[in-house]
Image (cartoon, helix red, strand yellow):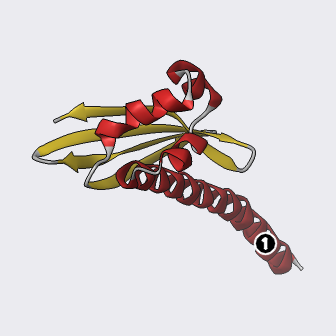
Amino acid sequence: MNKRLLVLVVLATMALLVLPACGISNDIKGAGDVGKEFMAALKNGDNQASWDMVTSDIKDEIGSYDNWVTFTAPRAFENFTLNSTNIENDKATLEGEATLGADTYKVTLILYKSGDAWKVAGLDFSLK
């Protein structure tokens, strides 16, 4: 009987450790996918898709979809990589690099999770 109880305690403990890790893994994948889709939309000049992926705060700051089109025009990167993802609660920070001509930029995207959806809440493209 004691062995059976010990096995149940061990299994319950493992479940408590593994289940949150699965959620974190899903969040990392979800945020990473949105970051890649956002950068691909910039690369491809798909302004509507990138506009749909940003938070209302960014939309308010930019002012209008037409302003977004102007903002994204010089950011049609030829190549990009996002190689670092950090998640804390419902905030993800993605970092990587993008190239445009001979220039290389450090890319930082901040995403917030609302419900099941990740949205781009901040972005920085700094010339390296």
Q: In which quarter of the view is residue 104 placed? A: top left
Q: How many marks?
A: 1
Determine whether, in the image, residue 14 is placed left or right of residue 48: right
Residue 55 x, y percent position in the rendering = 61, 33
Mark 1 nearby-residue class (10 Å; few <14, some 14–19, many ≥20): few
The answer to whether residue 2 is above or below residue 90 is below
**Figure quadrant of the N terminus:** bottom right
Say which of 34 and 64 sits in front. Answer: 64
Say which of 83 and 46 sits in front. Answer: 46
Determine whether, in the image, residue 33 is placed left or right of residue 123: right
Farthest residue in the front direction? 66
Q: Amino acid at mark 1?
A: Leu
Say which of 14 and 30 sits in front. Answer: 30
Which residue is painted at 40% across and 31% down in the image?
A: 70
The answer to whether residue 71 is above or below residue 23 is above
Which residue is painted at 55% across and 27% down in the image?
A: 58
**Figure quadrant of the C terminus:** top left
The answer to whether residue 33 is above or below residue 50 is below
Residue 51 x, y percent position in the rendering = 55, 40
Determine whether, in the image, residue 19 is placed left or right of residue 42: right
Which residue is painted at 55% across and 46% down in the image?
A: 48
Determine whether, in the image, residue 118 is placed left or right of residue 94: right
Residue that carries the numbered disc 1 in the rendered image: 6
Farthest residue in the right direction? 1
